[in-house]
Amino acid sequence: MRVVLLSGGGGGARFARGLADVLPAGDLTVVGNVGDDVEILGLHVSPDLDSLLYTLAGLIDDERGWGRAGETWSALGAAGEWGGEDWFRLGDLDLGIHLVRTQRLREGAPLSEVTAELAARRALATSLLPATDDRLRTLVETPAGTFPFQEWYVGRGHRDEVTAVSYEGGSEAGPAPGVLDALAEAEAILLAPSNPYLSLGPIVAVQAIRSAIVSRRVRCVAVSPLVGGRSVTGPLDRMLRRMAGGTTPEHVARSYDGLIDVLVIDEADAPAEAPVPLVATQTLMRDRAAERRLAETVLGVACG
Amino acid sequence: MPVVVVPYRGDSKRRLPASLRAAAAVAMLGDVVAAAIQVGSVVVVTDDLSVVPRGASGLADPGEGQGAAVAAGLALVEGHALVVNADLPCATADAIRRLAEAGLALVEAPDGTTNALSLPDPSVFAPLYGPGSAARFRAHAPFATVAIPELEADVDSGEDLERLASRLGARTRALLAVHA
């Protein structure tokens, strides 16, 4: 069964791994967020694509939830000693992928091609696509000013309240090669338990992707990233309260207005009412078995 | 506001005509949920999570019978719970409200099985479904038996649907009109 997943890193990447575990090889296409891509020390870093790649390839540090297992940070420390920017935690192992990606991009290869090359090095059975090859950046508006996503999230420790989110370049960005074909051929479209504003918003800010989902002929199912009205990690609960007025399944569903047919929520948030049918299950992915269970449940919702 | 638990199995209506079995089961579920969401939040416990109607929260049926399905739904409820079967296409919001107001109560089907329960304390529930279950529920706890015609009329066969035609909910009626 061909499935397209729209995802950020973190919980989205774990859900992607669950899907990859239960679907036949080759049936899963993951469209990853690039709105929080950032240039650090001259390197092009794609944090969500990296999280997806590391997770699907078994390289992720599962406990920390980001970066590679067995990571160290000597190079970053040395860069800092020489006066380089060291607020974004590039690990020594992690640097490898950024060096290779940056070189290939400088040679003129589009991000989608570079991503495919990187995935091929690990023989992934999952197609990993960036939402777009064009420049698209998430901007976070706060009372202290407007910041590029990583500067606010990592640099300022996401302490400022968010009043609005915008996607610079979103209206001009075209979908990366393969994204529209995958959506057209999909038997189900899934939205990962990622942040609707910061992870999935930038993907559907690409108008052709949004249009393809709005005019879908198959079911689109989103998994709420909230458990008991709270984010598992990150600032989503605060953002939803401020920007949507609350953290119930209804508020989450409204952030996907027109895009989804069903919202999968945690049992802690049920029963509830929303503009779309809800399905309650245990959404917290404590281990690989829980990732697979959630994946199977969501596929059951999408396809019956 | 009570929470209404609706157990639903896609494969349970074997005596309905094959041509409309699946569609009729979903239509009846839709009518029950449409009535129930006017009374409280609705949890549909089902083996087919792709059919959960708008307004409801679906929950996977653990697959150990109706009693276990209802118990799984009740586990999400704090406070007053109602259990309303999915094969009651004549159910109305008013009928479900009357059930809720009856305290610890049940609605008995003509064949002695149980169509609906009102559980002010959900922990009173026990998995007693099956033939003669209404009497078993009454023996288990002081359930009042309330006569609510809209909740007594369960549908097992095509004849049931024909007999109840004028009282059916909108979805089930529309389906029959298409098939007539």
Image (spheres, rainbow, N blue to C red):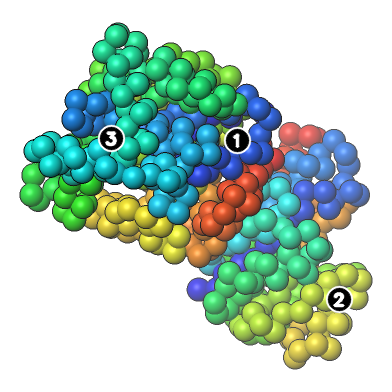
- Give neighbour class at mark 1: few <14, some 14-19, many 20+ (Cα, 10 Å): many
Secondary structure of the residue carrying tag 2 is: helix
Residue at which label 3 appears: A36
Above or below for A157 versus A51: below
Residue A280 visible in image: no
Report the number of discs: 3
Task: Look at mark 1 in the image and give the residue it sits on.
Answer: A20
| Residue A241 in view here | yes
| Real-space Cα separation, disc 2 to disc 1, in angstroms | 45 Å
Label located before the other in sequence (1 or 3): 1
- Tell which subunit mark 1 falls on: A
**Side of B72 where A180 appears, left or right:** left
- Disc 3 versus disc 2: nearer the observer: 3
Task: Say which of B121 and A177 sits in front.
Answer: A177
Q: Residue at x 78, y 69 (%)?
A: B67
Residue A125 in the image, given as x and y percentages of width and height: 60, 26
- Of residues A143 and B3, the one drawn nearer to the viewer in this rendering: A143
Quarter of the image holding residue A92?
Answer: top left
Specify the subunit that label 2 lies on. B
Which amino acid does the dot numbered 1 rest on?
Ala
User: What amino acid is at disc 3?
Assistant: Asp
Q: Is residue A279 above or below residue A205?
A: below
- Asked if residue B32 lies left or right of residue B2, the reply is right
- In what quadrant of the picture does the C terminus of chain A appear? top right
Residue at disc 1, secondary structure: helix
Q: At 65% across and 66% down in the image, what residue appears?
A: B73
Does the residue at mark 3 contact the one at mark 2 (Cβ under 8 Å)?
no
Q: CA distance from mark 1 to mark 3?
A: 24 Å
